[in-house]
Image (tube, rainbow, N blue to C red):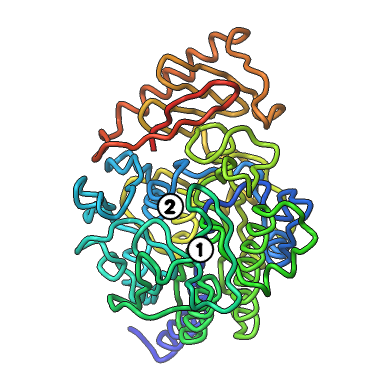
Amino acid sequence: MLTRRHFLAGSLALQAQPPRPNLIIILADDMGYGDIGCYGSPDVPTPHIDALAKQGTRFTDGYVSCAVCSPSRAALLTGQYQHRFGHEFNSGPIEREGQINFGLPTGQRILPDYLKSSGYRSMAVGKWHLGARPGYHPLERGFDEFFGFLTGGNAFITQKTPTGRAVGADGDGGRIPAKRADPIRRGNEPVEVDQYLTDVFREEAVKFIDRNKANPFFLYFAPNAIHTPLHVIDKYLDRVASIKEEKHRLLAAMTVALDDAVGAIAAKLKEAGLEQRTMVVFLSDNGCPEETGAGTNGPLNGEKVTYYEGGIRVPYILRWPGRVPAGKVYRKPVVSRDIIWTFLAGAGIEAKVVHDGVDLLPFLRDNNTPHEALFWRAGKARAVRKGKWKLVEFGDQVSQLFDVDTDIGERNDLSTRHPETVKELRALWQKWSDDMARPAWPPRYRKLTVNGTELNWEL
């Protein structure tokens, strides 16, 4: 027989349940491994990102699922290899999207889909790049709010932006447009924005936190900083005036603006008393394109588009006070696909789908290895990492083996000294690849030279 005491006990038990954590992904765009202070930049001040690392765990071997934007984002938000559903290549110009039927397949669930039934409110701020056609909009993919743009790139300033400055990079000629090629949208409606875009995105993120401080929320903060074009305003340029090289100075100023946005988000969480209840992850979607002459992947080999470390190893930080070790440097390989499962586990939400990632929280406690192996594929480019060994191949033109524990810069090809390891890793990769889908649309190409070999990389 149930008594009043039983009901009181049940009520107290419900009250004792900790509130579900708030969840924030801060996704930088094209940020290199050496572009911020806590990953070795000697001249770019990033105190707020560095503070996240001091208050949480910094991963030295943090990987993304692809060396270019859209497939990387598809894997991040689904927690699966993007190859499972054919999202192997980027979109290219917006007019190409309809020609190739581009977009994250609508049958794939993403993080806000899992959160909705547990009372979370979700907002995407910034760059989407997972489909601009009807049916692919963030509001049709589980997000409750959206402020940003739908395609793969955009201008940070217009000719109306006060003190706007530009330098040519990546073939753009340093032009300041009269208006943005892709309009900024609030939900589905285009809005007029002439302020510096990173600042506008920062304010939207802070307002969303303020509106939702009484209930659990997920913020996907994905500004296009620090992707080209190299656009900035004077107040950020003035803070890096000591940097002499022009392109690097502009990129550093753009990074300072992004760091200020991270600081504003952190300050709002503190002001609202939400620090202890919020998981924050910071990472980049891929490495930087060093060919622009602006950013750097630090000690890493290669760059964006390639499957050397410079294309896929990125800054990666996780903070959850009291639950994630503070000041820890974690040296085992992790991947962006782990984030969704770490968030869902922290929120106590089960998702009965294929996991191509893990909940990182127990691994941070016991220091075990989260992944037996990690795999990459983009057309002819392929890579696999198992333990200290990394095999990079490109068609039949390149086959190189590196010990990335001792040779982070991939300078010493050990393939001829360890042919059995090459054979083992190649077989592992082939078995994985055979389980994946074929690309759903064709690639584009970019010629890049790495280790003295020019290759026509697919992206």
Pick the front one: 25 or 253: 253
**Residue farthest bottom in this picture:** 4
Crowding near the residue tagged with mark 2, few <14, some 14–19, many ≥20 C-alpha atoms within 10 Å: many
Observer able to see residue 281: no
Q: Where in the figure is residue 293, as x and y percent of width and height? A: 62, 45
Of the numbered discs 2 and 1, the one sitting upstream in the chain is: 1
Q: Are marks 2 and 1 in contact (CB under 8 Å)?
A: yes
Q: In the image shown, does 310 or 415 lie closer to the viewer?
A: 310
Number of marks in picture:
2
Please give the name of the residue rendered at 43% of the width and 47% of the height, measured from the top-left corner: 72
**x then y, percent, for residue 162:** 57, 79
* Residue positioned 74% across, 63% down in the render: 240
Q: Judging from the image, what secondary structure is the residue with disc 2 in? A: helix
Question: Which three-letter amino acid code belongs to the residue tagged 2?
Answer: Leu
Looking at the image, residue 447 sits to the left or right of residue 188; the answer is: right
User: Which kind of residue does numbered mark 1 sit on?
Assistant: Ile
Q: Which residue is drawn at 54% across and 74% down?
A: 196
Where 74 sits versus 213, above or below?
above
Q: What element carries label 1?
A: strand
Other residues around mark 1 within 10 Å, as few (<14) / some (14–19) / many (≥20)? many
Answer whether residue 80 is visible to the viewer in this image.
yes
CA separation in Å, label 2 and label 1: 10 Å
Q: Is residue 358 above or below residue 382?
A: below
Percent x, y for residue 447? 46, 31
Residue at 34% x, 28% y is 433
Q: Quadrant of the N terminus?
A: bottom left
Image coordinates of residue 19 in percent, x first then y, are 50, 77
| Quadrant that contains the C terminus | top left
Residue 172 drawn above or below residue 293: below
User: What residue sits right under mark 2 in the picture?
Assistant: 76
Q: To which residue does mark 1 refer?
A: 25
